[in-house]
Amino acid sequence: MKIKKFLHNRLWKNNASVVQLLGLCPVLAMTTNAVNAIGLGITTTFVLIVTNTIISLFKRVIPKEIRIPIYMLLVSSIVTSIEMFIHAYQFNLYRSLGVFIPLIVTNCIVVGRADFIAYKNSIFLSFFDGLFIGLGITLSMFIISLIREILGHGTLFFGLHKIIPYIDHSFFIKILEKDFTMLLFALPPGGFFVLGFLIAFKNFIDTNNKNKVISCQVLCSCLKKNIKIRK
């Protein structure tokens, strides 16, 4: 039950992108294409996992007064290492993500989770917090990019060879003809529209679930009262 609550809290209830609205710059800029969204999402997840794990491991020797600069130094070192790795082995993905890889250093989600979770909890909890917070961000980015790529370009997984090098460069799924696409969704305003729709859809589901719980509680209360009256 605790594991289910842990997952629900990080993937749905307190999703960093859709609920907390943190790190929106890469979420809106890199979601024109599903491949770019997956690439940046996986990179951010890896940074979160490594940062949380290292800080939790050395939390007892990190001075409280200067912990934030230490977080920033650590995150920048990890991000630089990942950037160099992607540049060396996935150059096409590196060109697509561009400046948004080093910008992970300034992402408040990474430093926030490091200070709020990793600095105060065990390595085990910190590791999985980073993993599922990252997966929540990746999932949000993927859903937004899915809608924007299909409606804006009429394709799906265009440029998949950037993250899977053995796939042919011409591989992608054609969903809509060019005449039926809407350029708006390929532009920055389209990112805001889709993000707003996703937030509204999540709130709608949460409200419906909350109303169902309240209805069940009222029904149970009425049944209990009827049983007492009969007695």
Image (tube, grey):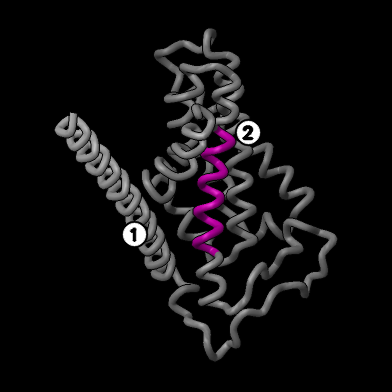
The magenta region covers 130-145
In the rendered image, which quarter is residue 93 located in? bottom right
Hey, which residue is sitting farthest front in the picture?
231
| Res. 200 mark | 1
Q: Nearer the viewer, residue 35 or 80?
A: 35
Residue 5 point in image, percent of width and height:
47, 33
Hey, which residue is sitting farthest right in the picture?
166
Comes first in the chain, label 1 or label 2: 2
Where does the C terminus fall, quadrant-wise?
A: top left
Residue for point 73% across, 60% down? 162
In the rendered image, which quarter is residue 158 located in? bottom right
Q: Amino acid at mark 1?
A: Ala
Q: Is most of the magenta stretch helix, strand or loop?
A: helix
Residue for point 60% across, 87% down? 177
Classify mark 1: helix, strand or loop. Answer: helix
Residue 25 point in image, percent of width and height:
44, 53
Residue 161 is left or right of residue 223, and the answer is right
Hey, which residue is sitting farthest top in the picture?
60
Residue 82 point in image, percent of width and height:
68, 40
Classify mark 2: helix, strand or loop. Answer: helix
Residue for point 46% across, 11% down? 63
Circle 2 residue: 78
